[in-house]
Amino acid sequence: MNERQELLQRLGGDDASDVREAAFFAGEQGVVEAVPVLAGLLENKNIGVQEAADAALRSIGGSAAVEAVIPLLRSERVPVRNVAMDILRSVGGQHIDALLELTHDSDPDVRIFVADILGATGSVRAVEPLVRALLHDPESNVRSQAAVSLGELGSVEAAPALGRAMRDEEWVQYAAVEALAKIGHSGAVDALLAAMDGCSDLVLSMVVDALGDIGTPKAASRLLDRLPRFPEVLAHKAATAVVGILGARSLGLLSDEGRERLRVCLLGALEDEDPEVQNAAMQGLATLGGEAASWAILNIAAGLDADAHAERLEIAVNSLASIGVTDALVKGLESSDLSVALTAVAALSRCPGPEASRLLMRAFWQKPLNLQRVIMDALFSIAGIEAREFCLIVLRRHYDGKVFRGALRLLGEKLHDREAGEVLFSFLGHQYNDVKEAALDACIAVGGERMTARFLEFCRKTNVLQRLMGVYALGRLDGARHLAVLERALSDESPRVRKIALEAVADQCANKERVLPLVASMLEDPQPEVRLVAVRLLGACGMPEVVTHLLHSLEDSDDWVCIRAMEALGEMRVEGAVPQLTALVRSPNRLLGIKAVHTLGNVGGSKAFQALLAISGEDDQEFADAAQDAIEAMQAQEGGQ
């Protein structure tokens, strides 16, 4: 008995496990002689055997597999029919003639099945038989499936036939519309447009959706012309489809008549129950504008939950801003309804120019505190010099820290108003820290000689916070010019001042001959938090000159200073650090030891590899595992290079 005969014998055996194994082998070896038996196994009660036969038939394929599986389309068992159809969808194109013969079968179910399968073959030879079935088969389910499959094939040549099918039963019309939408060619557009006059409202709605999905200017033009003849709900959908096709920005290029016709429909669409229709309508009206649109969109936005409907709210606010300053926004700003007023403020914050900012300033004093804070943020976005006097009044009259911060930011960071420098500087003594910070940023933004002189004076104060602000500001304003002052601050009695001075000095790293020794000297500072900043700054510098200082920091008494030095040396791949890192592995502090192992992996090179190899063989499992991980990371990095 030869090998293939033995295989066929095994496929006919009673042991399900052996049959399953034999089926997989037949598929792998492409044993065509096994195809009839494999087809029969699709009806086996054992699921594993069925799956193995299924996979084998797909793998072998060809005319033999197609002809063997086709009879199963007539099986009384639905699961068997479904498996057969799925296999034929996969391999049917390899012997399409056998499938085409079934398009004339007397059994309508078989004709439905084969129409389905032909759509998956991708063969142009399937188009003509499917068109014939679409137009002439006596069973509506066959015609419907033929339409679906023509859509799957995407054949442009099928568009006229699908257009004719739009006169068929409604069930077939649905499938034809979906197929034309998938084809998406100008021929499909023509067929859909021609069908609009003779179909029901439900099918017409599908046609409008399909035209919107295809998205050709021709479809937009015809939809726009038909807007007055559509039922109200369909007019809304058609109008939003036009917006989707042309894009909101292009709507302004339409004729006056076209814009007005579309605007009226879009206003109606704002009342549609479908949120997507409302969204599209808002985007279209953003270009077409008008008071009525502004009022309607404002009311929609005011009713939206900011968390649950964030995207829709963003569309609404952007649309209101695009329409511009309207009476609706003015009245909305004056409204006692907080949601309406907040929406109006949000829209005005995106309307650049003095008109919007003056409206906000005029409303400010009549509003509750939470809305005043929002108005200050809005003014920072859009206001110009027209807001200067208003901000000064706010700083004199108000009491709220967040409002103060808004006014300080606007005067300093936005307007750079040096004439307001005295007022800004006075807020450095405010009781709230966040106000002090805003005032400090504003003063730095204003800059100038007078402001610099004030901060130089601060550096000589006995008050630690004032010295802190002075050093920070001088570093931001012109650190190179005031390097001597910053150097003196490195010896300040306050660790906080020394840290700020250290960061300011390090910013001048271009002058490395002077700056590097200054930063390195802070590695001897008595306070660990200062040494930690020094190590971080040296590591960030990345110059070869810092290596000696980082190696020195590996001996620091503070664990975190040591760890930051290791990280910097690892980033720089300093092989000279290997001996000290290896010694740190033996540290009583296991955190340092594990960190040293990881750093050896980052450093790389033969010496680090040898050290890690030794550690990986030790009895301490945690260190051995860490060393193994580091070695694997090194190997992966070297493999990627």
Image (tube, rainbow, N blue to C red):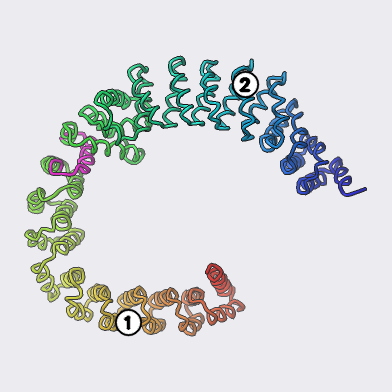
Cα gap from disc 2 to disc 1, whole angstroms: 88 Å
Q: Is residue 459 magenta?
A: no
Q: Give the quadrant of residue 23.
A: top right
In this picture, which residue range is highlighted in magenta?
A: 334-356
Residue type pointed to by label 2: Arg
* Marker disc for residue 591: none
Q: Say whether residue 335 is left or right of residue 94.
A: left
Tell me: residue 450, above or below residue 159.
Answer: below
Write the residue at 78% across / 33% down: 68
- Residue marked by disc 2: 132
17 or 103: which is nearer to us?
103
578 or 322: which is nearer to us?
322
Mark yes or no: residue 124 visible: yes
**Disc 2 or 1, which lies upstream in sequence?**
2
Residue type pointed to by label 1: Leu
Category of crowding for the residue at label 2, using alpha-carbon neighbours closer than 10 angstroms: few (below 14), some (14–19), many (at least 20): some
Marks counted in the figure total: 2
State the image coordinates of residue 78 (x, y, percent, origin top left): 71, 28
Q: Say whether residue 313 is left or right of residue 393.
A: right
Write the residue at 64% across / 25% down: 129
Tell me: residue 177, above or below residue 601.
Answer: above
Q: Is residue 354 magenta?
A: yes
Mark yes or no: residue 47 visible: no
State the image coordinates of residue 412 (x, y, percent, origin top left): 14, 58
State the image coordinates of residue 543 (x, y, percent, origin top left): 36, 78
- Residue marked by disc 1: 523
CB under 8 Å between discs 2 and 1: no
Write the residue at 48% across / 27% down: 187
Tell me: residue 426, above or below residue 175.
Answer: below
Q: Give the quadrant of residue 439.
A: bottom left
54 or 89: which is nearer to us?
89
